[in-house]
Amino acid sequence: MDDLAAVSIDVVFPPEARAAALRDEVRVGLTAVPKELQPKWFYDDRGSALFDQITRLPEYYLTRAERAILSTRADEIAALTKADTLVELGSGTSEKTRILLDALMPERFVAFDVSADTLCASAQALATHYPRLAVAGVVGDFEQHLTALPRGRRRLLAFLGSTIGNLPPPTRAMFLRDVAAVLAGDESFLLGVDLVKDPARLAAAYNDEAGVSAEFNRNVLHVLNRELEADFDARAFAHVAEWDPHEEWVVMSLRSLRRQSVRLDALDLSVAFADGELMRTEISAKFRRESITAELAAAGLRVRRWWEDAAGDYAVLVASPSGSR
C-alpha cells in the first residue's frame, strides 16, 4: 500500500453511532402515520452504485445540468470565493469535484460523507490524481456534524446535486443556519438547486424506463433486511414518484402491493402494511430563485452570484454570511 497517497480521515459518525441512528430513525418512521424512511439510508454500496447509474440516465437531467454550469462557471467561482480549501458535503464519488479543483487549485480538499467506504475510495482517488493536494475526509452526518469540519483556511463549502431538496423545510432551515454558523465572514457556500419545471419532465426523471430509480428506491428495504434483521419482500413493494404541486416537490414512496406484516428482529418490532399503503422514502423539493434566496437570507446567508443552465432547469449559487462583503 506504499504507492497510495496519504489521506487523513476523521470519523465523527462511527459505525455504532450510525447503527443507533438507523435503529432510532427507522423505529420512529415505521410507527408514524403515514410511514416514512429517511433517504440517507439508501446509500450503502449498492445504493450508491444505483444512484450513480441514475445520474447517467437520459431522463435524469440534474447531473448534466449542474456539470454544465460548473464547467462554464468554475473560473468565476474561483475568482469570487478565492478559496484555498474546498469542502464537499455528501461528496459521494466526487466526480464533479475535479471541475472545481482544477479551477480553484486549492491547498486542501475535505470530503464529507455518511458512507465511510464511499468517502475513502473517492478521497483516495483524488489524492492520487492531485498529488500536491492535501486531502482529508470526515465521516459524518451533515445534519448534525458540520462543526467537525476542519477550520483554519478560507473554505468553499459545496453542497451539490440539489441534495438540499431532500430535506423537509424545518430540517432545511436548521441545516442552512448551521452552514451560516460554521462559515467565517470570508468563506462561501456553493449550492446546487433543481428548479420548478414542467411536471412531466420531473415525472420522467424519477420514473425512468430502465427501472433504475425503482431499484434504488427498493434498495432501502435490502438495507433494513441486512442491518435490522428484517424480512421485507422487496417484490411486494412498488416504486412511486409523484409531483406535489402545492409543496412543489417530488414525493418518492414505496406502495405495498398486498396486505402484509414485516418483522424487524433488531428492533423487536412488527409492522403491518395495508394493501396499497404508501411509505414515503424521499422528498425532492424544487426551488424558485426567490424562495431559496429567502430561505438563505432567513438563515443568515446572502446570495452573491446565481447561474442557471441554458434550459433554466437548474441553478448553482454562491452565498456568504450576511455580514460579509
Image (spheres, grey):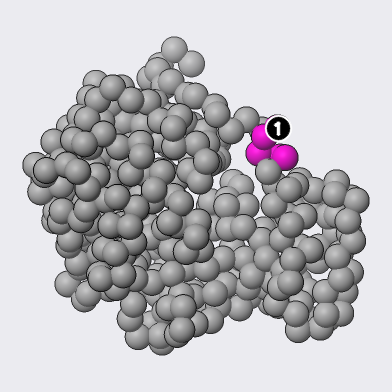
Q: Residue at x 48, y 16 (%)?
A: 1
Q: Nearer the viewer, residue 202 or 320?
A: 320
Identify which residue is drawn at 87% across, 71% down.
272
Residue 154, percent from left and from top: 22, 30
Q: Nearer the viewer, residue 144 or 225?
A: 144
Q: Is residue 310 left or right of residue 288?
A: left
In the image, 308 versus 129, the foreground residue is 308
Q: Is residue 101 above or below residue 134?
A: below
Residue 200 location (% of width, % of height): 41, 87
Q: Is residue 290 left or right of residue 172?
A: left
Q: Could you tell me the amino acid type at mark 1?
A: Glu
Question: Residue at label 1?
Answer: 16
**In this picture, residue 60 sits left or right of residue 32:** left
Residue 271: image location, x then y, percent? 86, 65
Q: Is residue 121 magenta?
A: no
Residue 130 drawn above or below residue 221: above
Based on the picture, tell me whether residue 19 belongs to the magenta stretch. Answer: yes
**SS for dot 1:** helix
Expressed as whole percent of the image width and height from the top left, the position of residue 109 reads: 31, 31
Question: For the magenta stretch, what is the residue range?
Answer: 16-20
Look at the image and tell me in which quarter the C terminus lies.
top left
Q: Do we see residue 320 in this rendering?
A: no
Q: Is residue 177 visible?
A: yes
Magenta stretch, main secondary structure, is helix
Vertical relation: 122 (above or below) 235: above
User: Looking at the rendering, which quadrant does residue 66 occupy?
Assistant: bottom left
